[in-house]
Image: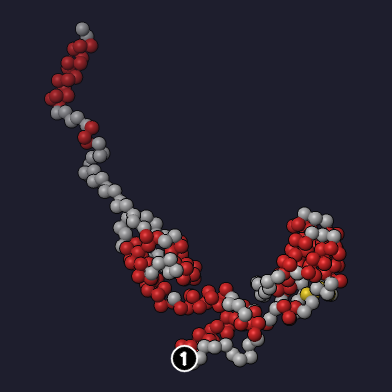
């Protein structure tokens, strides 16, 4: 299932959407919202532009009457934007090459070709539209793969090895803010800590720039009490048996005076 679709510049000023607003007697922003929701649904359904759109749900979300949504759909149909439950000319708006699975496959193939010493350009049969923009997925894949050896150095040093995928993403962003050497130095110092604080999640450690931490020295622990004492010996006044009996005798003599 595709989770994104192409949104070309100019949609917010599309004359047909303005015409749909006039025909339906609805605000332009409401028409734009409905049109965007139709495109989003068609992208998720991923069946040649067919969409699964609930007018009642849209009306509830926008806090309007369902009839208002129906009027917008009717206007879009009259203007040739939708027909029989599908976005018209969907294949002209979106391209099969935009599917995330295909993009990822192409990138992996280009990466393999590059490692084998070949060319890294796209195949000749790729459409011009496909090369118009760089996708977030391609950028993410390149960033993580390019930084894999450097991340491995960090991962070897870091003591709490949990959540590796999230840590990789956090690492690729962290190195935009500092150097790899600085991160690894900070991780090494963190791994050498002697206090009993809980280990930090690596993704959190990276996201919060924790390689900059300068933790205070933990306080010295008080010496443990000697065996057989309560630890309050400095508050106790020990007496010999003779002193105790003498003190008791004096107390009893005073009580009978």
Image spot of residue 150 (x, y percent): 40, 75
Q: Name the residue under label 1.
A: 116
Visual colour scheme: secondary structure
Q: Can residue 87 be seen in this view?
A: yes
Where 154 falls versus 204 (above or below)?
below
- Which residue sits at x=59%, y=76%? 135
- Which residue sits at x=85%, y=67%? 75
- Which residue sits at x=16%, y=22%? 245
Q: Is residue 36 visible?
A: no
Image spot of residue 251 (x, y percent): 20, 16
Q: Dot 1: what SS?
A: loop
Left or right of 205: which side holds 34?
right
Left or right of 97: which side holds 167?
left
| Quarter of the figure with the C terminus | top left
Crowding near the residue tagged with mark 1, few <14, some 14–19, many ≥20 C-alpha atoms within 10 Å: few
Q: Which of 64 and 10 is in front in this view?
A: 10
Where 58 falls versus 248 (above or below)?
below
| Quarter of the figure with the N terminus | bottom right
Image spot of residue 116 (x, y percent): 46, 91
Q: Which residue lies furthest to the left in this view?
A: 242
Question: Can you tell which quarter of the image residue 242 is in?
Answer: top left
Tally of marks: 1
- Which residue sits at x=78%, y=75%? 87
Question: Can you tell which quarter of the image residue 34 is in?
Answer: bottom right
Image spot of residue 249 (x, y percent): 17, 17
Q: Nearer the viewer, residue 19 or 145?
A: 19
Where 204 falls versus 252 (above or below)?
below
């Amino acid at each position: 299932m595709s989770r994104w679709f192409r949104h070309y510049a100019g949609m917010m000023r599309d004359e047909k959407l303005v015409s749909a607003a006039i025909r339906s007697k609805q605000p332009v922003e409401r028409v734009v919202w409905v049109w965007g929701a139709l495109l989003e649904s068609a992208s998720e359904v991923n069946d040649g532009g067919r969409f699964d759109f609930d007018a009642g749900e849209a009306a509830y979300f926008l806090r309007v009457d369902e009839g208002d949504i129906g009027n917008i759909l009717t206007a879009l149909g009259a203007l040739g934007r939708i027909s029989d439950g599908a976005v018209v000319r969907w294949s002209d708006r979106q391209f099969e090459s935009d599917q995330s699975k295909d993009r990822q496959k192409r990138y992996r193939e280009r990466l393999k070709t590059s490692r084998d010493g070949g060319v890294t350009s796209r195949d000749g049969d790729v459409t011009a539209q496909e090369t118009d923009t760089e996708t977030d997925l391609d950028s993410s894949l390149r960033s993580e793969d390019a930084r894999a050896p450097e991340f491995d150095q960090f991962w070897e040093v870091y003591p709490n090895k949990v959540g590796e995928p999230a840590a990789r993403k956090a690492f690729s962003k962290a190195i935009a803010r500092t150097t790899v050497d600085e991160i690894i130095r900070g991780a090494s110092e963190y791994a050498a800590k002697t206090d009993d604080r809980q280990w930090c999640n690596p993704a959190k450690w990276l996201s919060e720039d924790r390689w900059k931490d300068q933790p205070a020295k933990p306080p010295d622990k008080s010496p443990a009490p000697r065996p057989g004492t309560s630890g309050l010996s400095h508050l106790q006044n020990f007496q010999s048996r003779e002193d105790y009996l003498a003190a008791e005798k004096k107390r009893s003599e005073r009580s009978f005076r």
